[in-house]
Image (tube, helix red, strand yellow):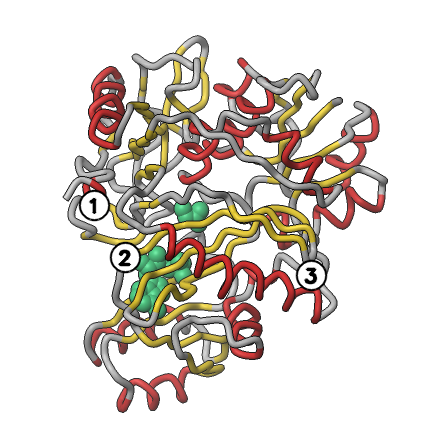
């Protein structure tokens, strides 16, 4: 079978790498992909993720059976709908169902209606009301702009002054929806759940991301600076509650409201005194969570997708090892950073996945904020962490930075 992977980041790199190991898959194509993916896929960077008509034409010409869509943008823009209209199977929800990620308000209203645990919220649609609201709300308060923001549309305001500058930032115009949310305290984790309408199968291995830019969870929010799995200090009972109270009810809620979701639903949860609550839903694999989870996954991803389609039991198999991944990012990210800086010292055999590098002549140079994830596997988190930082040390570049505390929450 021929499979097309849509996307250009580390998540798509690991998906292609994983598909390469599947006896079910003979050919792998990537649009737009990245240069590092050409070891495992036929990369077609001449087509952009946003060029839906060209993608459909490509899929038809190349006899693609399945398309796997990695990033949120093509999902929320309806690439799935277009491919499905051309009889191509797609792993990744259609435009309507992808609103669960594309609109914070859509997700919050759905959770409210179906009693799915999440932070209390108020929606505010213009700047004037927002300015009034922040005079009397409780602090800290969380401001979330409706719509996709690559992990950067969220502001945690500790005080009125911070909320004021947040309102100025999020309301570039007078109108616009911002969700003001109660601040929740607790440890966060990510649970990937395969969903085919009412059939929802959570991974029996969770991961933990590191969203802030700097050690000790300081600095601005990013797309993710590193991840690890499993998360040994989060008990199975929490994962079971997340399935019972969040994963199963949200799948049923979507069906009940007339949506058809096929793909992976990412549950970003936080463990509060009252149990796990939803911080966010995504309509796709997490990045970098996918890199650690699919590296640990022993079983066949393509087989899981086919089983999900047929609503058959999904039997995950995992390596006994733990996996830690450390993101190397361009200095300055998530704000301004330079591109075109040389990076070397890595191989492409499964220990590194690339999100922001391109080849110029024969050398790799930076082309994005998050650049490359270095992975380590070990019998426990401590040894996986040591291996991951050994892999970091092999990378030669003076243009990158990384966190030194990835997975430390599991080591305390
Ligand atoms: P989001 O884009 O919604 O995942 O938010 C990014 C990050 O902001 C989350 O991973 C949390 O660390 C933090 N955050 C978002 N919402 C809340 C909340 N209600 N309470 C505490 N932290 C939050
Ligand atoms: N790692 C968080 C995300 O993919 O949204």
Residue ID at (40%, 44%): 206
Is label 3 in a helix, a strand or a loop?
loop
Residue named by callout 3: 96
Position of residue 51 in the picture relative to residue 204 (left or right): right
Is label 2 in a helix, a strand or a loop?
strand
Q: Which mark is residue 409?
A: 1
Residue 162 x %, y %: 22, 73
Position of residue 378 in the picture relative to residue 40 (left or right): left
Inspect this view and state whether residue 409 appears: yes
State the CA–CA distance, disc 2 to disc 1: 9 Å
**Above/below status of 33 relative to 102:** above
Give the camera-side residue of 38 and 28.
28
Q: Which mark is residue 142?
A: none
State the CA–CA distance, disc 3 to disc 1: 37 Å
Which badge, 2 or 3, is on the more N-terminal residue? 3
| Disc number lying in front (3 or 1) | 1
Residue ID at (32%, 62%): 271
Q: Quadrant of the N terminus?
A: top right
- Residue 385 in which image quadrant: top left
Marks 2 and 1 close (CB-CB < 8 Å) = yes
Packing grade of label 3 (10 A; few <14, some 14-19, many >=20) is some
Residue 110 x %, y %: 57, 73
Residue ID at (48%, 31%): 294
Is label 1 in a helix, a strand or a loop?
helix
Give the camera-side residue of 334 and 389.
389
Q: Quadrant of the C terminus?
A: top left
Give the camera-side residue of 346 and 197.
197
Q: Which mark is residue 187?
A: 2
């Amino acid at each position: 079978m021929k499979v097309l992977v849509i996307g250009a980041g580390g998540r798509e790199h690991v998906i292609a790498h994983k598909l390469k190991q599947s006896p079910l898959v003979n050919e792998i194509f990537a649009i737009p992909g990245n240069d590092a993916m050409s070891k495992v896929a036929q990369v077609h960077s001449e087509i952009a993720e946003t060029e839906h008509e060209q993608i459909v034409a490509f899929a038809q010409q190349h006899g693609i059976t399945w398309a796997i869509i990695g990033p949120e943008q093509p999902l929320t823009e309806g690439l799935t709908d277009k491919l499905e209209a051309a009889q191509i199977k797609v792993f990744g929800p259609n435009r309507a169902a992808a609103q669960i990620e594309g609109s914070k308000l859509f997700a919050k209203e759905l959770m409210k209606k179906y009693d799915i645990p999440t932070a209390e919220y108020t929606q505010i649609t213009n700047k004037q009301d927002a300015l009034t609201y922040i005079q009397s709300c409780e602090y800290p308060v969380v401001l979330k702009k409706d719509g996709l923001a690559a992990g950067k549309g969220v502001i945690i305001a500790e005080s009125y002054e911070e909320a004021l500058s947040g309102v100025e930032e999020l309301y570039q115009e007078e109108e616009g929806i911002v969700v003001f949310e109660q601040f929740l305290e607790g440890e966060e984790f990510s649970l990937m759940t395969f969903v085919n309408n009412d059939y929802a199968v959570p991974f029996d291995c969770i991961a933990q991301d590191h969203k802030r830019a700097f050690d000790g969870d300081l600095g601005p929010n990013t797309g993710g600076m590193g991840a690890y799995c499993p998360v040994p200090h989060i008990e199975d009972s929490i994962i079971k509650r997340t399935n019972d109270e969040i994963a199963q009810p949200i799948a049923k809620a979507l069906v009940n409201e007339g949506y058809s979701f096929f793909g992976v639903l990412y549950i970003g949860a936080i463990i509060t005194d009252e149990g796990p609550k939803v911080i966010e839903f995504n309509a796709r694999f997490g990045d970098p969570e996918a890199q650690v989870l699919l590296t640990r996954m022993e079983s066949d991803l393509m087989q899981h997708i086919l089983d999900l389609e047929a609503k058959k039991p999904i039997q995950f198999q995992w390596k006994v090892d733990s996996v830690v991944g450390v993101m190397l990012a361009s200095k300055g990210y998530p704000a301004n950073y330079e591109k075109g800086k040389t990076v070397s010292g890595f191989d492409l055999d499964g220990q590194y996945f690339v999100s922001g590098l391109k080849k110029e002549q024969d050398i790799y140079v930076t082309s994005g904020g998050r650049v490359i994830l270095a992975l380590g596997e070990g019998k426990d988190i401590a040894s996986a962490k040591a291996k991951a930082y050994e892999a970091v040390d092999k990378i030669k570049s003076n243009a990158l930075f990384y966190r030194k505390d990835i997975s430390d929450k599991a080591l305390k």
